[in-house]
Amino acid sequence: MLQQSLPSEITQLKPADTDGRIQIAREKLGKDLIILGHHYQRDEIIKWADFRGDSLKLSQIAGEHPEAKYIVFCGVHFMAESADILTGPDQAVVLPNMSAGCSMADMANIDQIEDCWESLAEQTDITRVIPITYVNSTAALKAFVGKNGGACCTSSNARKIVEWALERGDKLLFFPDQHLGRNTAAQLGIDPESEMLVWDPHAANGGVNAKAIADSRVYLWKGHCSVHARFTTAQIEQARRDVPGVQIIVHPECSLDVVQAADAAGSTEHILKLVTEAPAGTKWGIGTEINMVSRLARECPDKSIFCLDPVICPCSTMYRIHPHYLLWCLESLVNGEVVNRVRVPDDVATHARVALERMLAIS
Ligand code: 13P
Ligand code: SF4
């Protein structure tokens, strides 16, 4: 679904007027409304969130509020889909701007996944391969995983999910983020060189040969996050030279060398907790999206907090949730019109729910 243009009466509003109208609409909607905000949202949006969190926490919160008629999800499309799957049929999940997608989620579509699965089935015992999808994926991929005995994971629970999968099968197909898959499997002692391969959906037979398929335990999809691909070990070395005593924490969507060079790695919620709970005076070089890092720096003035990449841009799709869009969807709800509802078709949702609920049970 495409995002319609907003009325110029809204796009011309000044920030203070926009805020005033958001406040009024929110009060009118009262208990019918909850607003969820992912940590990467800009300050002008996150201040309206009833709940902030990483992907896992927000999925759980969405499922825990059956009283809310409207769940306005300030995040990206796959997150709103997960919320729709985990909420009741009478609850509407609204994404303020329909063009807020995720470039990583776009790196794997259901046809490519099915082609990959069929090719693997010709070359290995597919009943021993467990598919795992990072939640940064479309509902169709989650449904595929649900139908084929797998589960979803987030960056908070990837380790537990991979352990669970390896108790059930000999091999994993992990999509769409090769880095989260590689980092997690490497943590569990699986050798990235000899026991993992990267399946390229644009190459014949994924760009791999029969021997690699036979020898590997982990089949990684060739997908990545363009924001986290910007972090390098050179930046970490520079930070350690420039800021004595600095601790480095990165998101596990960063590459393996970056994660291994850091002091810690974890989801956005994990980063937030570790840094906010650290003693005053500590110094943190962080490898994740800039809106979140800048906010942490402002909220923890007793610590020195900086982004490892000095010129990093925000996640451009998260940034598409502008206050004008939030205002537009809230006022539409007040007027009885549900705009930008994210609805996963029932046949897809049924199987995708299996994969998400398996994940929540294991987390
Ligand atoms: P978290 O689950 O850590 O919030 O990550 C989501 C995401 O898209 C990171 O790029
Ligand atoms: Fe997707 Fe990367 Fe943005 Fe996260 S930061 S939503 S993975 S593009």
Image: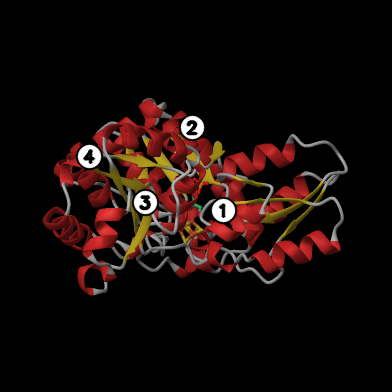
Which one is closest to the eye, mark 1 or mark 4? Answer: 4
Q: Secondary structure at mark 1?
A: loop
Q: Residues within 10 Å of mark 3 (few under 14, many from 20)?
A: many
- In percent of width and height, residue 143 lies at 22, 44
| Mark 2 or mark 1, whichever is nearer to me | 1
Q: In the drawing, what numbered circle is on residue 78?
A: 3
Q: Is residue 341 above or below residue 206?
A: above
First in sequence: mark 2 or mark 1?
2
- Residue bearing mark 1: 41
Q: Specify the quadrant that holds the C terminus.
A: top left
Q: Nearer the viewer, mark 2 or mark 4?
A: 4
Q: Give the mark nearest the N terminus, 1 or 3.
A: 1
Instruction: Return the residue at label 4.
Output: 146
Question: In the image, is the residue at mark 4 within 8 Å of ligand 1 by its beta carbon?
Answer: no
Whether the residue carrying mark 1 lies under 8 Å from ligand 2 is answered with no
Q: Can the viewer see residue 213?
A: yes
Nearest the eye: 185 or 147: 185
Q: Is mark 3 within 8 Å of ligand 2?
A: yes
With 47 as the anchor, is 214 left or right in this view?
left
Task: Tell me the distance, in whole angstroms, between the alpha carbons under discs 2 and 3.
Answer: 26 Å
Q: Is tag 2's residue or tag 3's residue first in the polypeptide sequence?
A: 2
Q: Residue at x 25, y 61 (%)?
A: 211
- Residue picked out by circle 2: 30
The scheme the figure's colours follow is secondary structure
Quick check: 309 above or below 187?
A: below
Q: Identify the image quadrant of residue 98.
A: bottom left
Mark 1 neighbour class, 10 Å CA radius: few under 14, some 14 to 19, many 20 or more: many
Rendered residue at 58%/40% (across/down): 269
Residue shown at 77% from the left, 66% from the top: 238
Q: Nearer the viewer, residue 178 or 154?
A: 178
